[in-house]
Image (cartoon, helix red, strand yellow):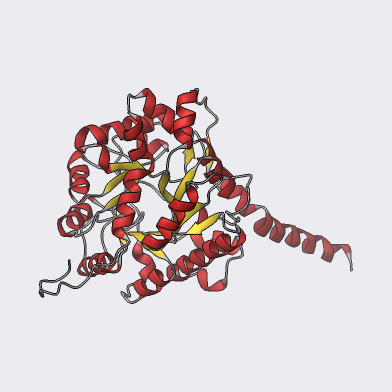
Amino acid sequence: MRKKYWIPLLVVALAVAGFFGVLPGYLESSMNRIDGKPLIVVSPEAAALHRSLHIVDLHSDSLMWGREIAQAGGRGHEDLPRLTAGNVTLQVFASTTKTPKGLNYDSNPSDSDVLPALLIAQRQPYATWFSPLQRSLFHAAKLDHSVWLSQGQLLKVTDQFSLDRLLGKHAKASGPVGAMLSIEGLHDLEGNAANLDKLYAAGFRMAGLTHFFDNELAGSMHGDKKGGLTPFGRQIVQMMETKGMIVDIAHCSHACVADVLAMARRPVVSSHGGVQATCKVNRNLTDDEIKGVAKTGGVVGIGYWDAAVCDTSPRAVARAIKSVRDLVGIDYVALGSDYDGATTVRFDTSQLVQVTQALLDEGFTPPEIRAVMGGNALQVIRAGLVPLLPDPGGHGNI
């Protein structure tokens, strides 16, 4: 072959190899970072307490990236070995299925999506390239594969029985880590309520109504119109509660939050974010919204990144948790890291003892720390997984 032909072909081959072989890892490494700033000194008291906890994290985006979470990875914020090292009992893995062009916290259109390029580069199945529903089903299958690959060290949680099985096993040394599926924005229903059955069958037990843009269900805090629940959104909230799927208001507009809290029959969660009292970012919850979540018996999951707590230090996380406790009580606050969600944090999941130490330093008692680090979330999840039964008196659901 003449030189003038093989040089262009070599350039194309190198470009293709870079796109499929290098780009996915580069993007994840550049978007899911640890800032490298100093950690706080961990006392023997904090280390011992941490080892005795049942830790629950309500939100991680690890399934979005092209690596196997059952195996140790050199990038991102978590994988099974790091979850084990951090003594995590249950990790909620979210399915993120659409990201608008020019992503920002203020206003995003709903008519763009930059994820297909990442999915193609990660060599995901063709069906996922243009279908949010298929992306979620792929994430569910990916988690199932990780559970199989883990040889019993990762257990999928879909009901009270599997939750109790996890807790029984985790009480022993080197116990497994639980995994529960969630959805970041129900635009993956693609406007069809029947698709909720497909998602439930795949194992999804929690779902946020919106992500960074308005959709058929409701307005987003980051959308163009930021409206409340639509009739379709109200229908889906009722269906979720009846089936035993936990409603998540993270990313919802203020109008959407108000509508959900007004109609909720089950505990509602805000899986990941912060509070306006310690960090005035538009996506964080107001005092009245926190009170509304508490009134349903739900929890507010506090994140670890700058826009959630206006810092990345564990002390900022502890201050946000303290604000919720002081406002509504210790029973209504939990952890919601947003690990691997294109966030920069101070510590990865193997270093969660940093939060335990920060809570001790803020004056939290061991029973309060047990509640925050997982007890509260476990109570809400346990209640939310049970389907509502028809009322034999004919008064609706009980």
At x 15%, y 56%, the residue is 262
19 left or right, relative to 86 = right
106 left or right, relative to 313 = left
Q: Does the image show residue 278?
A: no
Q: Position of residue 158 (x, y in %)?
A: 41, 63
Residue 212, image quadrant: bottom left
* Residue in front for this viewpoint, 182 or 115: 182
Q: Position of residue 347 (x, y in %)?
A: 50, 35
At x 46%, y 47%, the residue is 89
Q: Position of residue 4 (x, y in %)?
A: 84, 63
* Residue in front for this viewpoint, 259 or 102: 259
Q: Does the image show residue 26?
A: yes
Position of residue 282 relative to residue 195, above or below, is above
* Residue in front for this viewpoint, 324 or 125: 324
Is the N terminus in the top left, top right, bottom left or bottom right quadrant?
bottom right
Q: How many marks?
A: 0
